[in-house]
Image (cartoon, grey):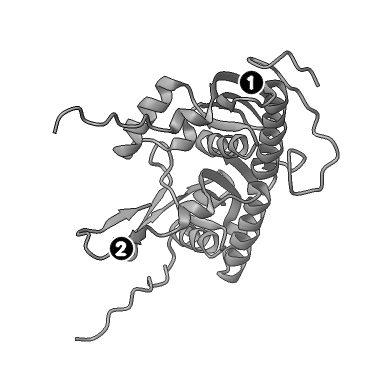
Amino acid sequence: MADQGTSGAVTTRSAGNRPEGSGPGAPLQTERGNTTIADAVVTKVASIAAREVRGVHGLGGGVSRALGSVTQRVGMSDERSQGVSVEVGEREAAVDLTVTVEYGESVPQVSQAIRDNVIKRIEGICGLSVTEVNVAVNDLYFPGDDVPEPQQPARVE
Amino acid sequence: MPSVSVTPPPEVGGSPRVPLARLALEAALALPDVVGGEIGPHGLRVTVDAPAGLLRGVSVTAQADGRYAVDLCLTARMVPLVALSEEIRSKVQAAARHAGLADRLDTVDVDFAGVLTAADLLPPTSIVPPAGQPGQETVR
């Protein structure tokens, strides 16, 4: 496994010994037919897996979140595709994630936990071998960010 | 008025393409982890079944050896998809055997176009506001 830091880090893994019928050891191409997994499926799995990690506040940069909130309202996108970019082949997948981490958490530990969980979920659900999970931390979240500023009392009635 | 049967009549001397498409889609959709059929990114996974209408999520193509390959495009629950695709293949092959079409069935390719979580499958919740507040808001 090679870890090159937090943003743009690359993790490689071998398939290991896995039970037949699950994980990347299970064949996607068989004599009885092929199984293909759409990009949208891998995107959704990666997004949910990243959000499962403690310390991850959200996915996507400020611009993509702002655009995403607009496109969601008109039904053009799913919140869970924000901040996730995938490349899916016949047997392998590579994932790029942009995340916001909660202030106070260890960014290297959170990004490693994201990587581990994303690999585990994609291999388990999709049967694809994950070659890369690149994590870009683009913001830190403070709990006070969501609290609206108190309204100033009106100076005139 | 007499009731109209929606069961398609059996094909006589025709191609097994449509019957295979019908039984393959029915076998796949009968599994609890398969949510629905999708026409696919290019709209190709559709078969016209004259009496029943369109079969969304399946196409069947003749092979050089006289058999027919089935392509399914499906949305599923978030479960291990490779194992699910093997289960789908087994069900399709069993259904083809039951229909006497096993020797006409070639490969069964399964394409998962989407996955749904439990939250995605929840019906929209209606929130009734407290008394005195007009209106009703529906949220997902």
Indicate the position of residue B93 as horizontal and vertical percent values: 62, 61
The C terminus of chain A lies in which quarter of the figure? top left
In the picture, residue A14 is in which quadrant?
A: top right
Residue closer to the observer: B111 or B97: B111
Indicate the position of residue A48 as horizontal and vertical percent values: 57, 39
Residue closer to the observer: B62 or B21: B21
| Residue type for callout 1 | Asn
Chain letter belonging to callout 2: B
Q: Residue furthest front?
A: A156
Is residue B140 placed above or below A28 in the rendered structure? below
Look at 49% across and 56% down and name the residue there.
B35
Left or right relative to B77: residue B11: left
Circle 1 residues within 10 Å: few <14, some 14–19, many ≥20: many
Chain letter belonging to callout 1: A
Look at 56% across and 25% down and name the residue there.
A99
Look at 35% across and 32% down and name the residue there.
A150
Is residue B60 placed above or below B90 in the rendered structure? above
Circle 2 residues within 10 Å: few <14, some 14–19, many ≥20: few
Could you give the CA–CA distance between mark 2 and mark 1, rounded to whole angstroms? 44 Å
Identify the disc placed on residue A134.
Answer: 1
Residue closer to the observer: B8 or B63: B8
Q: Residue furthest left?
A: A157
Which residue is identified by label 2?
B128
| Residue type for callout 2 | Val
Indicate the position of residue A84 as horizontal and vertical percent values: 53, 28
Helix, strand or loop for disc 2: loop
